[in-house]
Amino acid sequence: MDLSGLGRALLATAVVLAIAGVLLMLMGRGVLPRLPGTAVFGKGGVRGFVPIGLSILLSVVLTIALNLFFRR
């Protein structure tokens, strides 16, 4: 049984998740601007946001990349 393909897919997923995590951390600190569609909420000293715009952007980019990568 050849599991090398599954291993590559898991590594690619980990890299994408790591990049998304770094982007979210930078957005939370105000280093990167928020995309339109980001829902910000907070109370007192706690602030949170839901990056809907970033999620849509990542979805489009990943869809294109995976279609190019897995095209036969």
Image (spheres, grey):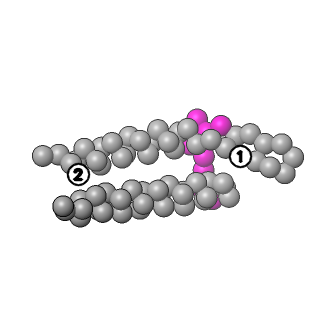
Given residues 46 and 9, the one toward you in this image is 9
Could you tell me if residue 72 is visible in this image?
Answer: yes
User: What residue sits right under mark 2 in the picture?
Assistant: 69
At mark 2, the secondary structure is: helix
Secondary structure, magenta segment, majority class:
loop
Horizontal relation, residue 41 to residue 27: left or right: right
Three-letter code, disc 1:
Gly
Residue at the front extreme of this rendering = 1
The residue drawn where x is 80% and y is 49% is 46
Q: Magenta stretch?
A: 31-39
Residue 36 appears anywhere in the view: no
User: Where does label 1 land, which residue?
Assistant: 48
> Mark 2 or mark 1, which is nearer the start of the sequence?
1
Work out whether 7 lies above or below 71.
below
Q: Residues within 10 Å of mark 2 (few under 14, many from 20)?
A: few
| Quadrant (top left, top right, bottom left, bottom right) of the N terminus | bottom left
Where in the figure is residue 38, as x and y percent of width and height? 61, 39
**Residue 30 vs residue 65, the one in the foreground:** 65
Q: Residue furthest left?
A: 72
Q: Residue at image x 68%, y 58%?
A: 29
User: Mark 1 falls on what kind of element?
Assistant: strand
